[in-house]
Amino acid sequence: MKGLTHLDPQGRARMVDVSDKLATAREAVAKGLVRMAPETLALALSGDAKKGDVIATAELAGVMGAKKTAELIPLCHPLSLSAVRVAIEPAQDGTGLTITARVKTTGPTGVEMEALTAVSVAALTLYDMLKAADKTMTIEAVRLTTKTGGASGDFRRAE
């Protein structure tokens, strides 16, 4: 296991110095699941929830979350994002909604945290908009699925 780059030799937290790193194309994809009752899923998919189009709102919130990552995660670098796409669709097993976020940049550091933040904010938005119908919803399996670019190379989760 590699050393933790966000700790200095004395064990203090630090922002990694990326000033000498090359700007390269980088992309990260993250996923997550909001599990809910069948009636809640039907309500979300209908577009007739009291608060409006739940899915469109959560997708937009995910994009906004990716853009705010450096403000939320203390040691993340503020990045110029080239693209953020958040898609929400019914889970294959019918137990909820799957969230997928794809984030791209050309820069000296990766966008894994931005993709994970996009999924997390979209999931929290789904919960917020649907909680009146179902307080038993769960947010599950938020994870990085792929990342490309950078010195550490590519990563693909076996799912």
Image (cartoon, helix red, strand yellow):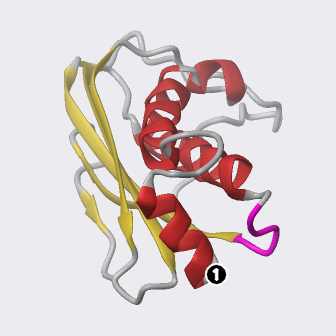
Q: Residues within 10 Å of mark 1 (few under 14, many from 20)?
A: some
Q: Which residue is mark 1?
A: 37
In the rendered image, the residue lying farthest to the left is: 25
85 to 30, vertically: above or below: above
Q: Which residues are magenta?
A: 133-137
5 to 24, vertically: above or below: below
Tell me residue 143's x, y (percent).
49, 63
Q: Residue at x 43, y 62 (%)?
A: 45
Q: Residue at x 43, y 85 (%)?
A: 94
Seen from the viewer's position, the closer of residues 24 and 10 is: 24
**Residue 102 drawn in magenta:** no
Seen from the viewer's position, the closer of residues 13 and 115 is: 115
59 to 74, vertically: above or below: below
Tell me residue 49's x, y (percent).
59, 51
Seen from the viewer's position, the closer of residues 48 and 83 is: 48
Q: Using residue 56 as the reference point, say whether residue 149 is left or right of it.
A: left
Q: Residue at x 52, y 57 (%)?
A: 2
Does residue 34 appear anywhere in the picture? no
Tell me residue 73's x, y (percent).
68, 30
Does residue 153 appear anywhere in the picture? yes
* Element under disc 1: loop
Q: Quadrant of residue 131?
A: bottom right
In the rendered image, the residue lying farthest to the bottom is: 93
Q: Using residue 117 as the reference point, say whether residue 100 is left or right of it.
A: left
| Quadrant into which the C terminus falls | bottom left
